[in-house]
Structure formats: C-alpha cells, structure tokens
Image (cartoon, rainbow, N blue to C red):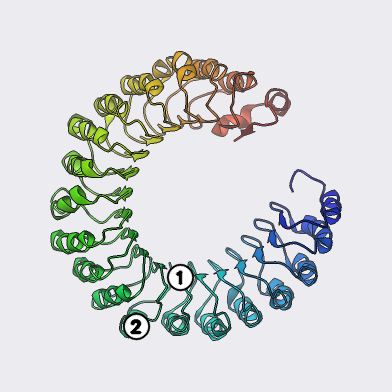
Amino acid sequence: SDRFNPVSLGTAVSVCTGLEVLSVSQSWDEDMIKILPGIEKCTRLKSLDLSANCMGRKAARILGTILHHLPLLETLNLNNNRLEAGGMLELAPAISNCKHLTELSLLGNELGSEGVRLLSRSLQDCTNLTDLNLFGVGVDNDAATQLACCLGAMQRLKVLDLGDNIIGNSGVVSLWDSLSRHASIEVLSLYWNRFGKQAMVHLSYSKLRFSRLENLNLGANELDDECAEAFVHQLGTSSLKVLSLKDVSISEVGFRGLAAGLQNCPSLVSLHLNQNRLDFHSAQELARALSCMDELQSLEMRNVRLDSHTLQPLRPWLSACSSITKLCLDANQLGAAGAYCVTSALSGCSQLTELNLGCNRISGNRFSHLAAALPRCMMLRTLKLGENSLDNNGAIELACSIKHCPFLEVLDLHSCQIRDGGAIKLFETLPACSALTELLLRSNLISCTAIFTLPEILPSCSSISSLDLSQNVIENDGATAIGDALAHCHTLTHLDISGNPLTKVGAEHILRSSCSNDSRITRLAFGRVVQQLDQSTLHELLPAWVSIS
C-alpha cells in the first residue's frame, strides 16, 4: 500500500465486491483511515491481513465498524500495529460479532492488561476460534486469569501463543488448569514469561489432560531442578512431537533429571535444549532418552557447554539416528576433534539436511578430518561453520570437500578468518556445486585479489543466487570486478558488500552493471557508501526492480 494513493486504493478495493482475501501493510494511521472504508463493501471477505501498519484508535474504530459488515470473515491478522487498550475498546465488540472467526493474531501490539481483558470478554462469543496469537501483547497475571476464564467457551482452540509476555506463577497456573480441560489444544507457547518454581511444581504434579498436545514451548522460564524430571515425564502421556526447553535455568543436575524424563517421550520429532548446562552424566541420560526417539528429526543443543568429552556418550546415538534431518550444536566447545566425531558418526544419517557447528573453536590446521567426513552426509543441504578459525587451510580443505556434497544449498562461513587464498579456492569450486544457492563470507579478510576471479567464475555458476561479502577489505578495484561479474551472471539476485572500504565510484560501477540485460540482481546492500551517492544518479542508474540499502 505504500506505493499507492490511499484514497485510490480504498476506492479500488470497494469495487472488488467478490474479494475473499485481502492484505494491506506498511501504511500509516492517516492512510489506513482512508483505505479502510473501501473494505466495507467486500462482504465475501474471508481473510483480512492488516499486519505491519500503524493503526491507532481512530483507525481501530473504523475497522470495528467494518467488521460488522464482514459476516464470513475467518482469519484476521492485526500483527505489529500500534493497538493499545483504547484501540481494543473499539475493536472488541466487533470481534465478538465475527461468528465464523477461526484465526486471530495480535502479535506485537501493546494491549496491556486492560486491553487483554477487553479482548477476553469478546472471545467468549468466538466459539469457532482455533488459532489465537497473543505473543508480546502485555499479558500479566490478572489478564491471564481473565483469559483463562473465557477459554472454556473456545472448545475448538488448537493453537495458543502467549510467548513474550509477563505472566507470573498464578497466571500460568490458571491458564494451565483451564487448558487442561481442552481436549483439542495442539500447540501451546508460554515462551519467555515470568513464572518459575511455584508454577512448575503445580504443572509437574497436576494431571495432564492434553491428549492432543503436539507442540509445547516453555523456553526462557525457570524450570526448577527438583521438578524437571517429573514435569517432562508426565508429558509422555500426550502425543507430544515438538518440545522447546531453551534456557530454562537448570543446572547440570536438573538437566540430568530432565533427560531422564525425556525417556518417556518417544514420539518427539523436534527437541530444543539450547542454552542449558550439560555435563558428562547428563549427556549419558540424554543419550538414553534419544535412543528411545525413533522419529526424532530435529535436535538443537546450542550453547550447552558440549565439548569433545561430554560428546562421547552421545556418539553411539549419532551413529544410529537414521531419522535425524537437522542438528544444531553451535556455540559449544567441540573443537576440530569434537566436530570430526560428530560428522564421522553422522555418516550413517542418510536423511541429514542441516548441520550447524558454528562457533565451536574449530581451527583450520585440524580441519582436514572434518572436511573428509562431510561427503558422507549425502543429503546435506545447509552447512553452517561460521565463527570458527578455519583460515585459509580450513577453507581449502572445505572447498575440496563440498564438491562431493551434491545437494548442498547454503554454506555459511562468516567470521572464519578466511583470506584470499582460501576464498579463491572456494570461488573456483562454485561451478561444481550445482545446487549451491547461498554463500555467506561476511566478516572475513577477503580483498580484491580474490574478487578478481569472480568475473570468470560467476557466469559459470548455475545456481548461486545470494552472495554475502560484507565486512571484508574489498576496495574499488574489487567493486569493478564484481560489476563485471554481475553483467554476465544469470543467477545472482542478492549481493551484500556493505562494510567494505568502497567509495561511490565503486558503488556506481556495480549499479551500472545491475542494469545489464543479463543481470538478475534484485537486492543490493552497500551500507554507508549509499549516503555518498547523488540521488539523481541513483534514480538514473537504479532499475525499478532493484532494492538498495
């Protein structure tokens, strides 16, 4: 909507009386006031997306009037507006009138406690609601209790997101007890609230009735050491498939109990244990639990203090986990030896598509064993090794290895201390990587010497679409080489060279090249050098389909 006159857009919408789906975003409050009246005549509308606007109370009042004329509305998305309690006062009566509403999302609005209470009263009439998103709207204990009272009317509710709020112990207990009577609830997120031991004790020893619960997120709260095992153990009575316990403030002892409880959750498909504290004994318990999960596809253990020693109990499971497709072990202390243990153990994982070993103290002089093991992961599509000290030695070893990964699509090597020698070897490998679409080389030490090889190499690449060379040491001569490459490259659409010592001369050369008939560039990132470009020059050189930053 930012490209159109708001009055004209409102008029155009009003003519489309048979419209069933409408999305309007990135408009200011005064523009929404002019656009919204046109929606009133779209009486067949089933889905209305007004996310990422700046609707204030006046626009909310108009929208409230319009909603009374949309009897078939099923989906309403008001994410990331500026709705507060006053705006909800205008909207609440209209929402209660939407009898067919199945999905309502208010993510990122500052409704506050009063706004949520107003909404709760209106939701009692929305008996068909299946999906409710209140992430980051300011739900506190009082509002959570009020919301819990109205949940009884929404017996079809399947998805409830209450993440990033300020719900304390009493509010969570009220919600949990109310939701326990909902046989239909499938997805529940209480991520990043303010409840701790008192609530977790209640949750751990109250009878769980969520027979259909498949996805539970309690991350960034305080899962007490003493009740960790009891709480997770009772989850086995549900059909849980996705469990997120990221940063739940438990010690190594608590992690040991949590891992023991996980043995009762054999149906898990995705498990997130990021930012907790793992030791050798808890790793042993975790290995036992993982061996019971025959369907596990995704495991995230970012920043859990995993090193080559604590990895050992997990190695037999890694060798036997035939179902795993995504493994994230970044921000640990594996080193080259630990990373090699992971990749060599995963050689039997025929389904692995994403591997993240970033920030693991892997050095280039010990990278050869890891590089040799990578081709054994035949289905690998995403490989992230950023923030390791690969340097030229590691980059050269990796370049030789990825040629034998036929499905690799994304390669992330940001902040790896790669210099020109390693970058040249990686660039020379690109034509042989027929599936590679995204290469990230941000924050390395690549200069013009390596960039000079791109005009000859990039036109031969059949798939590369995104190249990130930001925060390196590329000067104007390198920009000239990049421009020459763009003029003849049929696949590259996104290029980031921000944070390099370029001047407007180099930037203008790249802009001219993006106008070439052969260039497919749609997004260019220059960083601060854009401020040096004359606006008339920008309008003259920049094609209409290219965005610049």
User: Residue 103 appears at what percent x and percent y?
Assistant: 61, 67
Does residue 286 sit above or below 418 in this rendering?
below
User: Residue 111 appears at what percent x and percent y?
Assistant: 62, 72
The C terminus lies in which quarter of the figure?
Answer: top right
Of residues 260 and 367, the one nearer the viewer is 260
Mark 1 lies on residue: 186
Residue displayed at 37% across by 38% down = 381
Residue displayed at 43% across by 85% down = 177
The residue tagged with tag 2: helix, strand or loop? helix
User: Residue 203 appears at what percent x and percent y?
Assistant: 35, 81
Does residue 340 sit above or below 420 in this rendering?
below
Residue displayed at 51% across by 78% down = 140
Mark 2 lies on residue: 198
Residue 424 seen in the current view: yes
Of residues 434 and 485, the one nearer the viewer is 434
Mark 2 → mark 1, Cα distance in angstroms: 25 Å
